[in-house]
Amino acid sequence: MITTLYRQANERGFDSLLSAHLFNLIGSVGVSEGGSLTGAPDLGDLRFSEPKSGWYWSVEPASEGVSGELHSSSMTKAILSPSVAEVPFN
């Protein structure tokens, strides 16, 4: 019983942390007049700057006419993302 409560509390905390990081990214990235992604998200977590930490973020265009990609310095190589058709953005 105690183990279950502890696990549930940890999952809720982790979910809240990921949501906060997501909203920070959304608020920190924009599109320039030239149609390229701009921004310098600072998530305030050193894990996003340490290579091979397992913590990274990447912002890719989901609309036609937008170019560029932004990613954390911890992301040392590209990771294939599913297409917009496979995971639609609503």
Image (spheres, rainbow, N blue to C red):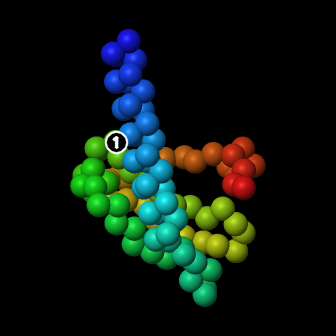
> What residue appears at the point 47 percent right and 63 percent down from the top-left corner?
25
Percent x, y of residue 22: 48, 56
Residue 41, given in percent of the width and then of the height, sits at: 39, 68
Q: Is 77 displayed left or right of 33 in the figure?
A: left
Identify which residue, 13 or 25, lies in the foreground. 13
Q: How many marks?
A: 1
Look at label 1 and name its amino acid.
Gly
Location of residue 31 with respect to 55 vertically, above or below: below
Seen at 54% across and 46% down, the residue is 80
Between 42 and 38, the one lying in front of the other is 42
The C terminus, quarter of image: bottom right
* The furthest residue to the top: 1
State the residue position of label 1.
Answer: 54
Find residue 48 and report its image quarter.
Answer: bottom left
Q: State which quadrant residue 86 falls in.
A: top right
Q: Is residue 30 above or below residue 70?
A: below
Q: Secondary structure at mark 1?
A: loop
Circle 1 residues within 10 Å: few <14, some 14–19, many ≥20:
few
Q: Is residue 72 above or below residue 11?
A: below
Residue 1 on image: x %, y %: 38, 12
Give the residue displayed 34% in from the left and 66% down from the top. Answer: 42
Q: Is residue 84 visible?
A: yes
Q: Is residue 78 visible?
A: no
Give the percent coordinates (x, y) of residue 29.
50, 71
Which residue is outermost to the bottom? Answer: 33
Q: Residue furthest right?
A: 85
For the point 49% across and 69% down, the residue is 27
